[in-house]
Amino acid sequence: MEKKNIDWGNIGFGYMQSDYRYVSCYKDGKWDDGQLTTDPNITLNECAGVFQYAQTVFEGLKAYTTEDGKIVCFRPDLNASRLADSAKRLEMPVFPEDRFVEAVKQVVKANEAMVPPYGSGATLYIRPYMMGTNPVIGVKPADEYMFRIFVTPVGPYFKGGAKPITIKVSDFDRAAPHGTGHIKAGLNYAMSLHAIVTAHDEGYAENMYLDPATRSKVEETGGANFIFITKDGKLVTPKSDSILPSITRRSLMVVAEKYLGMEVEHREVALSELSDFAECGLCGTAAVISPVGKIVDHGKEICFPSGMDEMGPTIKKLYDTLTGIQMGTIEAPEGWICEIA
Ligand SMILES: *Cc1c(COP(=O)(O)O)cnc(C)c1O
């Protein structure tokens, strides 16, 4: 397969138009067969449910070229089931989970020329999403929907190594009342944009959101879950109904326990105990793990001594093991790697 003429080592984390995308439409109570299309534009009625009531949900995953030249993706079945949960929460029809995985494979294969080669640092980001398409003016769910998947090659999340970031304890709550925090839906993300822009303006890389009821417990950031390492080498990760169930975080919990023999605690984490941890990281599909060196809570600085200048040693081990599994240099648990080509 002839690859596109792209400078793989120097692409950023952005959108680059690929040749093919997948589309399937829902009408009269059923999904059509779905197909690939070359048209990147969507034309919809001005009153479509997605525009009026933000009835839209999405997912994000990646395809990689492994060391032995295969194209694979990581646990797409979990993205399929999370999209189904998101759809149910917004009264949208579920796109069948087996068809989701097949559609991911089909669109990646069609865009094989844009899958970054092994060792380039770049990967193919895959964005499945779904929206209400017919006109709705009363507050109610749409009757017609479109499910689509596009792909775009993305560079490493960090240029020149993973330098630890500084984040702030946010003054804002993500508007995630009544349990909408655990879905990937357009409305939740739009509600976090003001907090992100504010944090960037103040010189921080990200926000730490707290539980809105007591503002004393750690939740997550706008696009990643937290992991902490205790001084005696345990992995601690916050538990709450309003945290997005990150596939990366769930995978890291298994890697810590089964591959590295670490103890893992999935429990409530108090803001007041942060200073007891040795290392802190943010985990998600985009960066795998971003090390956090410092958290600022309204002027009070919490520093993680073993992760201020570079990724801390335990987080580095977790990162190397998970990326080794994804790139095919370390044997994966059953069912984690989905072969595409
Ligand atoms: C996508 C996302 C994550 C990370 O989830 P992964 O499945 O690991 O990519 C965490 N939190 C939020 C709010 C997210 O949108």
Image (cartoon, grey):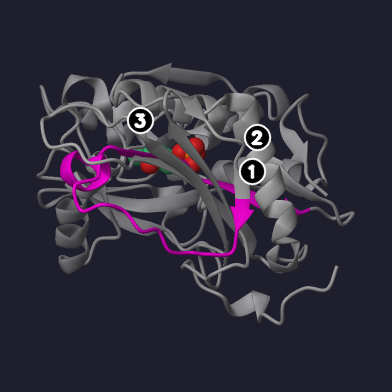
Residue on which disc 3 sits: 183
Could you say where residue 291 lies in the image, as x and y percent from the top left? 45, 51
Whether pointer 1 and pointer 2 mark residues with C-beta atoms closer than 8 Å, the reply is yes
Residue at the location (29% across, 43% down)? 186
Dot 3 crowding, Cα within 10 Å, few <14, some 14–19, many 20+: many
Residue 326 vs 88, above or below: the answer is below
Cβ of disc 2 within 8 Å of ligand 1? no
Dot 1 crowding, Cα within 10 Å, few <14, some 14–19, many 20+: many
Residue 43 colored in magenta in the image: yes
Q: Point out which mark residue 104 bears.
A: 1
For this rendering, which residue is in front, 27 or 149?
27
Residue 138 in view here:
yes
Please name which of the two marks, 2 or 3, marks the residue nearer to the observer.
Answer: 2
Q: Amino acid at mark 2?
A: Val
Q: Which portion, as a residue range, is magenta?
A: 36-65
Residue 300 colored in magenta in the image: no
Could you say where residue 218 lies in the image, as x and y percent from the top left? 26, 31
Q: Is residue 292 left or right of residue 198?
A: right
Residue at the location (31% across, 37% down)? 220
